Image: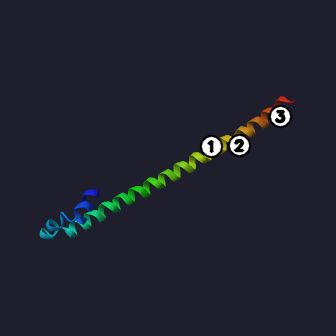
């Protein structure tokens, strides 16, 4: 993407871009790559959200479950 940005926006390559009519190609290619990266980021963010939520639930259940186990153990030992 950096290459496309540099070639499409630099003064040094302006002549070649105009001469070979590459501006539309560079613009569409950049948009295509940017859209692909955006979709990958969205998928990764969703995956991180789901796994983070599930692991948080497991951690919370373990934390409060230990209180329940200790409570049950103290009730049976005090008899």
Report the residue that reaches farthest toward the left: 19
Q: Residue at the spot x=22%, y=62% of the render? A: 7
| Quadrant location of the C terminus in the rendered image | top right
Residue 11 locus on image (x, y percent): 21, 66
| Mark before the other along the chain sequence, 1 or 2 | 1
Please tell me in which quadrant of the rendered image residue 74 appears: top right
Image location of residue 64, percent across then percent down: 71, 43
Mark 2–mark 3 Cα distance, whole angstroms, equals 17 Å
Q: Choose the circle earlier in sequence order: 3 or 1.
A: 1
Does residue 78 lie above or below 55 as drawn? above
Q: SS class of the residue under badge 1?
A: helix
Q: Residues within 10 Å of mark 2 (few under 14, many from 20)?
A: few
Q: CA distance from mark 3 to mark 1?
A: 25 Å
Mark number displayed over residue 23: none
Disc 2 is placed on an element classified as helix
Q: Is residue 75 left or right of residue 57?
A: right
Residue that carries the numbered disc 2 in the rendered image: 64
Q: Residues within 10 Å of mark 3 (few under 14, many from 20)?
A: few
Return the residue nearer the eye: 14 or 56.
Answer: 14
Element type where label 3 sits in the image: helix
The tag earlier along the polypeptide, 2 or 3, is: 2
Callouts 1 and 2 close, C-beta under 8 Å? no
The x, y position of residue 55, in whole percent, is 57, 45
On the picture, is 68 further left or further right than 28? right
Question: In which quadrant is the N terminus drawn?
Answer: bottom left
Tell which tag, 3 or 1, sits nearer the viewer.
1
Q: Residue at x 21, y 69 (%)?
A: 23
| Residue 75: mark | 3
Q: Which residue is mark 1?
A: 59
Residue at x 25%, y 57% (from the top left corner): 3
């Amino acid at each position: 993407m950096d290459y496309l940005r540099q070639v499409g926006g630099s003064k040094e390559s302006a002549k070649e871009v105009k001469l070979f009519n590459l501006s539309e190609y560079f613009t569409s290619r950049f948009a295509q790559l940017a859209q692909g990266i955006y979709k990958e980021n969205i998928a990764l963010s969703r995956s991180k959200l789901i796994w983070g939520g599930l692991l948080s639930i497991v951690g919370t259940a373990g934390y409060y479950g230990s209180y329940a186990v200790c409570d049950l153990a103290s009730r049976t030992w005090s008899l």
